[in-house]
Amino acid sequence: MTDMTNRTPARMERVSALGFLGYALGLALMLWCLAGAGFSLDKVVSAPPRFADFVSRAFPPNLEPQVLSRLGWKMVETLQIAVAGAVIGVILSLPVALLAGRGLIAGPWVNQVVRMVLGFLRAVPDIAWALVFVVAVGLGPFAGMLAIVVDTIGFCGRFFADDMESVDKGPAESLTATGARRIDVVACATIPAAMPAFVSTSLYALEKAVRSSTILGLVGAGGIGIELKVGFDLFDYPTAFTVILMIAVVVIGIEQLSGWARTKIIGDQR
Amino acid sequence: MPSSVTDLDLQDRPVRTERALDTGVQRIPVPRVDIEAKSVSKQFGATPIFEDVSFRLVRGEAAALVGANGTGKSTLLRCMMGLVPVSSGQVTLLGHDTVKARQAELRTLRARIGMVSQKHNLVPRLSVLSNVLHGLLGRHAGPRHWSHSLAPEASRHAAMAALDKVGLAHLAMRRADRLSGGQQQRVAIARAIVGQPEILIADEPTASLDPAAGEDVMELFFQLAREDTVTVVFISHNIEHALRYGDRVLGLADGRLQLDATAASLKAPDLRGLYD
């Protein structure tokens, strides 16, 4: 019998000089970032009493019927912005993703250019798109919807393309072997195979759109965000607190609904 | 025994001919060469897969392609179909050079060939009927053949007839991924034959099936191929299948075609050397 203790590896590997340097650099980078972010222990310690003061002034939330009615309609508008923007964005994402996906219908140069454009759409935050569209089409929910459309294309275009690239290539090769054109192969083999991932990504895009649309009002792009801003600006913390609670309830509700829909649509079709 | 099927061997078989030789005594039909590989070589980067592979198959002939794993059998089939470019050499299918053919020509040519893969390669979420209709995409491009609900009546009938031949017409509307492995491979065969191909290519069609289902699939595949006098190339690791279903056996080993003989002239031990 061999002596196993001689061959059992050590629990921890000894760190090399280069590894040690890497850790030290990582730590220095983190300290530099904290300094840039204005990290202050004093502020951390003094924050809880101030937060408690805010809660005491905000509680109980404003539940007056006319306030609830006004906020309720603003929340409906928020959902309208989110749903319209997400649905249009998802629909427009499919042709964009076909151009972005490698080996689908377009050549590598087109793939690269479309992916760069999608990267740009994602890199600009939705609130910045909302500001741009407020300038372009004026204040109101339409600017918010356009911001959601652009943000959804940037998100879904990229993920739809990745989903199509990662499906099993077997069915596509078999259809290619029948003499089918690329577009027919993509329509008959690639898209059906990627459909569960499309549904999942689209539902996530809807959740994301609902979260985004709640703050677009801060820049005048419609929705309940404007009520939050006005509440804080006028020190009407009970109303602002009501808005925060409504946003939380709606976002959690949409996430639950989306999870249920995901299971119903793709759960038994995998 | 001759090393390949001769013209005279084929006289009693229902072979379609394109021309005939005038012997001065009687006109002997000359079978048409459907598949011809001339000095075909393939390498991936600096790694050679096979080199100098040459063979020809005439109409109605069935050739078993055998050899150990990694000898390039599947790659050779893909090279023949133009799915993978050859490094050198010439492949002629149905009189067309697939190496020099442009994409549009290749598509037209592929529409005359049926292919069955190791894995059935059906689109899992679609109906059996839609999957079979996809076998007609080479002849009828466009959205009308994307789904059974859009397809023209003639195509639906052709697909149902193909399903009937493989005994699965009653499952036409079932989702493909709800079938057993053997049934899925039968659907793949229906998809391959729906366009009435002149050549059938099968890459280990029984690899993912149990022995009984594998026997059924091979029996069905060759019954259909012989009914229509289709030229067949199939890969098999089952020596018994290679000898029973092939008229010819082509053996790849060490990157070369080491064996090209009639199945009748071979016995199982002759093939085992290819796997050493």
Image (cartoon, rainbow, N blue to C red):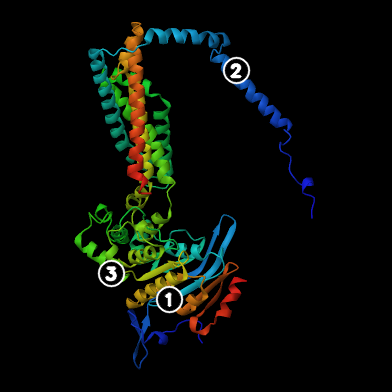
Is the same chain shared between marks 1 and 3? yes
Residue A27: horizontal and vertical position, in percent?
A: 64, 23
Measured in 3D between alpha carbons, the distance from the residue under mark 2 to the one under mark 3, in whole angstroms, is: 72 Å
On screen, A30 above or below A103?
above
Q: What element carries label 2?
A: helix
Q: Which of B91 and A219 is in front in this view?
A: A219
Q: Name the residue under label 2.
A: A32
Residue A100 visible here: no
Q: Which residue of the protein is positioned furthest toward the front in this rendering?
A: A60
Above/below status of A72 relative to B181: above
Looking at the image, is mark 2 or mark 3 nearer the viewer? 3
Q: How crowded is mark 2: few (under 14 residues within 10 Å), some or many (20 or more)?
A: few
Q: Are marks 2 and 3 in contact (CB under 8 Å)?
A: no
Q: Where does residue A21 sit, x and y in percent of width and height?
A: 69, 27
Asked if residue B21 can be seen in this view, the reply is: yes
| Marks 2 and 3 belong to one chain | no
The CA span between labels 2 and 1 is 73 Å
Q: In this orientation, which residue lies closer to the viewer: B226 or B207?
A: B207
Q: Residue at x 44, y 7 (%)?
A: A53
Task: Please determine if labels 2 and 1 lie on a single subunit.
Answer: no
Residue wearing tag 1: B62
Q: What's the distance in space between the residues labelled 1 and 3, CA to CA? A: 24 Å
Mark 3, residue position: B164
Please, which residue is most extreme toward the bottom here? B25
Give the crowd class for mark 1: few <14, some 14-19, many >=20 residues within 10 Å.
many
Instruction: Compare marks 1 and 3 and give the one earlier in the sequence.
Output: 1
